[in-house]
């Protein structure tokens, strides 16, 4: 049999290769392959437009790009050279700098400061500095660098003013209208903004035309994946997973995203191997691995791929399909017997297809439902139960019911979190109360029921007796706010909305001279989940490992900012166990009479 | 070997471990009692370091030869003594009753008085520091305030039964209050086995050349015990002084005082490092209870460092004196942060390092015995006298606490004598045999009273896991990690992760990432895939990140800070 292959599959597999060479020069590695039919991947990014626009000005500023390896710094440099010099640089070779003469301006593109020697790097920065100081310099720079290296070189070169300028923009975001220097940190880009674009390109029908005539056309999981991932809803749900990672403060680089999405599509398989496997056995009538909803979590991948695939590691946080939801499982098993719309959806979802082993799933289901005793006779789990986790994952991407889909993600309070991000007023008020309660419980390590005030408490943690946490600070609930804030900028894509808990100074501090700046505490999805669970009766150990120190950090900050050291306060408040709940008690020492008062 | 502290001229007999790790550390001391004893000693010296070294020093310039032992019998009876106590005594029943009667007068009048007293009592009791079931006099409070500090006490139980009836029937009702306190002594050293004193001496030695740091430490610790919980402190003081006023000690009883032990090799740079750490650590704005809790962790961590430092095979007085010990005696403590995510590879390796530390301590003890014997043997010219002379010196040098151990020492000397009477004398062989025999004899004492120290402390502070069970390995618990960050980075300081890891290695021998593993020569020694170290480092970074102790910049440039 003549070998048959869609070249685009091997093109995609270049993204998933995990050798270390490949990591170092990813961009070049990809671009050296023959161009695919629908053209190479072009992700339309705000940053690219921004940099182009700035350089198109008559007197452009210099721009420094910082970011992780894989954030697309080199790619961006290439695009700028292409745009202004009309040159395609597929291989940089040993050159790290490229000069473009445009009108009276000399634009120096430095693709990576880290690849230069210390002296050469410092030299570049000195030149940049000189160009910035001189009133009529015609030299401009586009410098890509990782931040650590940049800071180190600036310090070593004693360029204090430049360091300060860079530092300010790194901390506060880019100064978009600066005429001399703009610093953009690509680390802040939300990569989830590009998932749809990348998937559209990967599943572009033009790329898959070559499959016609393939002997396993109707049995091929890769082709199946391409078809499903082309659907808008599926793309949105993949994007959702990326969004969620961003809410755990995980920054995914574009390179990591491409590696993951390409793997999701191909499962790391080549056409040759796959055709061989499928032709040789009745493999297509099993629970086919390699379908996209398994590949998203790389469930079949070998350990070395999992270690390199950052997204896969992070997605372990969202193990969709591992826990049972009655409504979902019921639908999977009994859905075909319902009426109306639900049945229609069922037929659409569970029609024989590659991912269901054609009719295998339906057979196993019928055996489970009607097989009688023999179906359960051997000690093994019934075949249908093995289908369940994957069918749940399938529903996560393909099911219509978005409420149910959200509940498949094992974060119980995700729906609330999403309401908050939309700034829904009622949710803000309700959740604020829960957060206060959760914090009270987290601070005191007791099942406090009070939620009108936030109590910052201190106690001896290893006491042998019933603990009675001392109240250090008390904030009425009115002095707290929950807000959702976006940080959009014209310089790059940042679609993330941050949830913040703002804690104003306690009433005891009104009218004093001390700082009354409120404390702003960023509440990511994990902390939110932890506190909400505590408020709803959860125990301290679930997520405690991840959240314990962060909560203490908040406590330290509140105490550091608001507790007055020189206080002459003569009273002390503390929690005591009072029948069925904990209540606050107060003791006073009256120094004039020398008596203790209740 | 030079010693730093108070050297008792009348005796120079100490347990084997004391000759290596100072006088002294003992397994029985609870981890939190290192903090309690240390603060007791410091407050007893009126918050001055470097005191109590020279007992003959004239009392000018405010130099203190002894520290004061706080008794606070009124307070501790009020808090801990009741009918459920392990060792009730009619005297204490009576004393508690009388104190309560008077206390009613210092609380708000009215029928609430009892209720308020009860509330005060449970509040104070919630600071109970010791989890074990002990008698009231052996319990202690977590030092939220100086007024919560008191020294270990014991009520003599000799002739308890007869004494009880006698006192109960005849004298107790009209006994003077101070008589009720009789029979309570403050000289036992069960819980305050001198571990806290040792820490006091370490800080004193470490700040000999740095008066500024010395007073910084003293000031901050004093503030820690006074500033934040002053209401609690005042209440505790009021209760205690009610009893002492009642007592009106007319017999001119001497105040209870104590003297410090000693530490070896006062020039050792480790002492300066510990003092530096503490100086940085105390520069914080944490809640005082949190700060004290972390301080307890830090103290135990420092004590562990001290044990490992001196147990190192390269540890010699010369190196401790000329400062080369910092590099020569750095331990290699491989920390496992992967927690089985690597199928236990690092866990197993880390467990080996824990066992290695234990073995080092045993080896050190053994070589100490051998070196001593060899040194003494040099000065004994007469071969016939050799064994007897050695035996005398051994008994003078190493304390055999029980009659049993003394007897067994004599027996082993006799056995050696018989053995060497029949064959020609081979001095080195005899020394080796004698050394083995002594060590076997001392081993059980050494193991029981000393070897457990590092195990107990390391587990208590989350430096070793699991708390119970086999395969102990080095880890970094949240509290310990936080204490270490505070001890190494000042309030507004930042440090690159790489530097921070290097610093943890250089200062404490903690091995986390690949850089430290190669510096400690583990890469060649263990021959495990270097990727494990990388993952370990990432796990450490994640831990810091979750704690908000790090700001991550691009390309693994992460800056560690206090948050």
Image: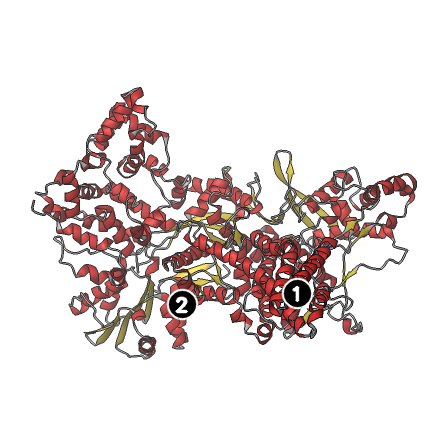
Specify the quadrant that holds the N terminus of chain B. bottom right
- Above-or-below relation of B533 to A435: below
Say which of marks 1 and 2 sits in front: 1
Counting from the top left corner in percent of width and height, residue B396 is at 73, 65
For label 1, the residue is B19
Counting from the top left corner in percent of width and height, residue A217 is at 12, 40
Q: Kindly identify the residue that appears in the image at 40 percent across and 63 percent down.
A: B523
Closer-to-camera residue (A435/B397): B397
Which label was assigned to residue A21? none
The answer to whether residue B38 of the structure is visible from this angle is no
- Above-or-below relation of A442 to A282: below
For label 2, the residue is A167
Q: Is residue B350 left or right of residue B89?
A: left
Q: Is residue B546 left or right of residue B209?
A: left
The answer to whether residue A245 of the structure is visible from this angle is yes
Q: Is residue B300 left or right of residue A185?
A: right
Closer-to-camera residue (B288/B113): B288
Secondary structure beneath disc 2? helix
Q: Chain of mark 1?
A: B
Counting from the top left corner in percent of width and height, residue B191 is at 70, 53
């Amino acid at each position: 049999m003549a070998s048959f292959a869609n070249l685009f599959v091997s093109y995609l597999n270049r993204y998933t290769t995990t050798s270390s060479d490949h990591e170092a020069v990813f961009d070049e590695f990809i671009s050296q392959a023959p161009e695919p039919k629908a053209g190479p991947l072009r992700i339309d990014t705000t940053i690219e437009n921004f940099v182009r626009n700035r350089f198109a000005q008559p007197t452009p500023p210099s721009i420094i790009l910082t970011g992780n390896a894989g954030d697309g710094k080199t790619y961006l440099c290439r695009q700028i050279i292409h745009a202004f010099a009309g040159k395609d640089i597929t291989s940089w070779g040993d050159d790290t700098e490229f000069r473009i003469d445009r009108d009276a301006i000399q634009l120096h593109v430095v693709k990576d400061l880290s690849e230069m020697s210390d002296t050469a790097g410092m030299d570049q920065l000195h030149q940049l500095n000189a160009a910035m100081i001189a009133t009529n310099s015609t030299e401009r720079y586009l410098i890509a660098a990782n931040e650590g290296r940049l800071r180190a070189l600036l310090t070593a070169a004693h360029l204090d003013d430049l360091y300060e300028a860079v530092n300010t923009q790194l901390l506060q975001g880019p100064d978009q209208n600066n005429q001399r220097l703009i610093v953009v940190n690509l680390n802040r880009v939300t990569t989830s903004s590009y998932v749809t674009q990348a998937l559209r390109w990967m599943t572009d029908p033009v790329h898959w035309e070559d499959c016609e005539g393939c002997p396993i056309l109707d049995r091929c999981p890769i082709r199946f994946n391409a078809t499903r991932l082309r659907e808008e809803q599926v793309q949105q749900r993949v994007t959702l997973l990326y969004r969620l990672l961003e809410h755990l403060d995980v920054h995914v680089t574009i390179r990591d995203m491409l590696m993951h999405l390409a793997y999701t599509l191909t499962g790391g398989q080549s056409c040759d191997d796959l055709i061989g496997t499928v032709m040789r056995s009745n493999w297509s009538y099993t629970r086919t691995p390699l379908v996209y909803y398994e590949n998203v979590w790389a469930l079949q991948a070998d350990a070395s791929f999992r270690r390199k695939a950052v997204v896969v590691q992070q997605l372990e946080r969202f193990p969709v399909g591992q826990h049972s939801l009655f409504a979902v499982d019921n639908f999977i098993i009994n859905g075909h017997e319902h009426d109306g719309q639900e049945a229609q959806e069922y037929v659409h979802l569970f029609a024989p297809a590659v991912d269901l082993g054609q009719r295998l799933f339906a057979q196993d289901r019928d055996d489970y439902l009607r097989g009688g005793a023999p179906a359960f006779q051997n000690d093994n789990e019934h075949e249908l139960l093995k289908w369940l986790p994957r069918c749940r994952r399938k529903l996560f991407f393909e099911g219509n019911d978005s409420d149910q889909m959200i509940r498949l993600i094992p974060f119980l309070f995700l729906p609330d979190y999403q309401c908050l991000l939309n700034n829904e007023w009622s949710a803000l008020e309700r959740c604020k109360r829960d957060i206060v309660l959760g914090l009270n419980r987290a601070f005191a390590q007791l099942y406090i029921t009070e939620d009108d005030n936030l109590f910052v408490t201190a106690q001896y943690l290893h006491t042998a007796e019933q603990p009675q946490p001392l109240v250090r600070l008390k904030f009425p609930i009115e002095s707290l706010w929950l807000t959702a804030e976006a940080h959009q900028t014209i310089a790059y894509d940042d679609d993330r909305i941050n949830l913040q808990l703002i804690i104003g100074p306690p009433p005891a501090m009104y009218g004093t001279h001390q700082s009354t700046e409120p404390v702003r505490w960023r509440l990511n999805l994990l902390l939110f989940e932890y506190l909400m669970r505590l408020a709803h009766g959860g125990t301290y150990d679930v997520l405690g490992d991840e959240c314990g120190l962060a909560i203490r950090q908040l406590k330290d900050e509140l105490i550091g900012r608001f507790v007055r050291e020189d206080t002459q306060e003569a009273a002390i408040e503390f929690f005591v166990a009072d029948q069925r709940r904990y209540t606050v008690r107060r003791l006073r020492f009256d120094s004039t009479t020398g008596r203790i008062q209740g | 070997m030079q010693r730093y502290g108070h050297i008792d001229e009348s005796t120079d007999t100490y347990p084997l471990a004391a000759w290596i790790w100072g006088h002294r550390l003992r397994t029985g001391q609870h981890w939190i009692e290192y903090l309690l004893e240390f603060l007791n000693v410091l407050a007893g010296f009126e918050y001055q370091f470097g005191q109590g070294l020279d007992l003959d020093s004239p009392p000018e310039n405010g130099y203190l030869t002894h520290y004061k032992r706080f008794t606070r019998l009124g307070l501790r009876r009020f808090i801990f003594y009741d009918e459920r106590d392990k060792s009730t005594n009619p005297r204490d029943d009576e004393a508690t009753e009388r104190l309560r009667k008077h206390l009613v007068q210092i609380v708000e009048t009215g029928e609430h008085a009892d209720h308020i007293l009860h509330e005060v009592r449970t509040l104070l009791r919630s600071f109970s520091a010791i989890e074990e079931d002990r008698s009231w006099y052996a319990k202690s409070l977590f030092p939220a305030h100086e007024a919560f500090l008191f020294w270990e006490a014991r009520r003599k139980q000799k002739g308890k039964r007869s004494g009880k009836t006698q006192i109960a029937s005849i004298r107790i009702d009209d006994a003077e209050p101070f008589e009720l306190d009789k029979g309570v002594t403050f000289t036992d050293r069960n819980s305050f086995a001198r571990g806290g004193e040792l820490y006091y001496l370490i800080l004193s030695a470490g700040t000999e050349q740095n008066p500024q740091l010395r007073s910084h430490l003293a000031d901050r610790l004093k503030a820690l015990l006074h500033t934040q919980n002053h209401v609690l402190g005042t209440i505790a003081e009021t209760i205690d002084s009610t009893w002492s006023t009642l007592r009106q000690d007319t017999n001119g009883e001497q105040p209870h005082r104590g003297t410090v032990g000693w530490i070896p090799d006062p020039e050792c740079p480790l002492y300066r490092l510990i003092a530096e750490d503490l100086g940085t650590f105390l520069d914080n704005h944490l809640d005082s209870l949190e700060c004290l809790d972390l301080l307890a962790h830090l103290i135990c961590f420092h004590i562990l460092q001290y044990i490992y430092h001196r147990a190192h095979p390269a540890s010699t007085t010369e190196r401790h004196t000329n400062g080369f010990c910092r590099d020569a005696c750095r331990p290699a403590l491989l920390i496992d942060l992967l927690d089985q995510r690597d199928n236990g590879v690092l866990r197993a390796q880390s467990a080996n390092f824990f066992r290695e530390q234990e073995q080092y301590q045993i080896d050190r003890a053994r070589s100490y015995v051998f070196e001593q014997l060899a040194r003494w043997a040099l000065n004994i010219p007469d071969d016939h006298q050799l064994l007897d002379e050695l035996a005398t010196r051994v008994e003078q040098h190493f304390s055999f606490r029980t009659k049993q151990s003394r007897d067994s020492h004599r027996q082993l000397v006799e056995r050696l004598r018989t053995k060497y009477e029949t064959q020609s004398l081979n001095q080195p062989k005899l020394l080796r045999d004698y050394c083995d025999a002594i060590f076997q004899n001392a081993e059980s004492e050494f193991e029981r009273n000393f070897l457990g120290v590092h195990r107990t402390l390391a587990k208590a502070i989350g430096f070793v896991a699991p708390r119970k069970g086999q395969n102990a390995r080095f880890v970094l618990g949240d509290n310990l990690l936080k204490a270490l960050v505070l001890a190494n980075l000042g309030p507004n300081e930042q440090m690159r992760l790489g530097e921070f890891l290097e610093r943890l290695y250089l200062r404490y021998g903690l091995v986390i990432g690949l850089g430290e593993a190669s510096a400690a020569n583990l890469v060649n020694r263990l021959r495990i895939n270097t990727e494990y170290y990388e993952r370990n480092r990432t796990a450490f970074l994640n831990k810091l990140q979750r704690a908000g102790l790090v700001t991550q910049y691009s390309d693994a440039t992460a800056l560690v800070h206090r948050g």
